[in-house]
Image: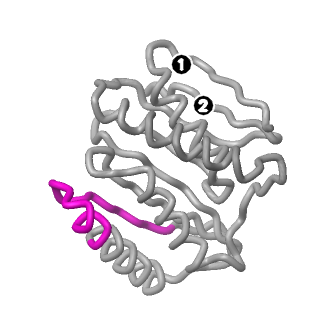
Amino acid sequence: MKEMRLREADGSSASVGLLVSILVRYPEVCTISYMPESRALDFSFMVSRRVEEDEIRAFKEKALASIQVYLSLLRAQGEPVLEITGSYVGDITQIQLTRDVATLTADEISMLIGLILAGFSDNLITDRSEDLEEEDLVVQEEFIANLLADLKESVQDKKLVGFREEGRVVVFNKTA
């Protein structure tokens, strides 16, 4: 199991735990942030090639359609907020996916990761580890579901950022 460290987490254990669990469960996620002002999670993925704007636009349309179908099957209330953008550093593309917490579910996170894998699998930069067994993955998914429910019901005022550093998951409070 990877070493996990919590930095400056005072009073925000559910949201810190959520970010840690998502990073441990989904090695495809490069960074994840919780933005309290918009009550949204911001996922970052790295692709080892230049992903053009039309490909990002097509991916966004597919992701939004998938989310809408999923939420309609759940008979969920509310309109999902989904923003997907791309930025470039040489031939590497960073894909940012921002999703509101109010309508987000743990199963949807799994679905979005699946869509990212399907769209960019050959070029997706991951921190894949053989440390987690199938049973651990299921536990992480349940943990994510519970922590996401807690985050929906609580007021969190700290902007948190989580990322991987030398085989560890690090989460910290990002102040202005």
Q: Which residues are magenta?
A: 69-86
Q: Residue at x 28, y 73 (%)?
A: 69
Seen at 36% across and 54% down, the residue is 99
The type of colouring in the image is one colour
Q: Which residue is drawn at the image coordinates 61% and 48% (left, top)?
A: 138
The tag on residue 9 is: 1
Image x and y of residue 144, in percent:
50, 41
Magenta-span inclusion, residue 158: no
Depth check: give the residue in front, 76 or 156: 76
Taking 57 as reference, is 31 above or below it? above
Residue type for callout 1: Ala
Q: Position of residue 31 (x, y in %)?
A: 59, 48
The count of marks equals 2
At x 26%, y 70%, the residue is 68
List x then y, in percent, for residue 64.
Answer: 32, 72
Residue 152 in which image quadrant: top left
Residue 171: mark: 2
User: Taking 60 as reference, is 16 left or right?
Assistant: right
Q: How busy is the neighbourhood of tag 2: few (under 14 within 10 Å), some, or many (20 plus)?
A: many
Q: Residues within 10 Å of mark 1 (few under 14, many from 20)?
A: some
Vertical relation: 26 (above or below) 69: above
Q: Secondary structure at mark 2?
A: strand
Residue 11 percent coordinates (x, y): 44, 14
Disc 2 marks a residue whose amino acid type is: Val
Q: Secondary structure at mark 1?
A: loop
Figure check: 170 above or below 131: above
Q: Position of 111 compared to 169: left or right?
A: left
Mark 2–mark 1 contact, CB under 8 Å?
A: yes
Q: 117 or 72, which lies in front?
A: 72
Label disc, if present, on residue 77 of the rendered structure: none
The quarter of the image holding the C terminus is top left
In the rendered image, which quarter contains the N terminus? top right
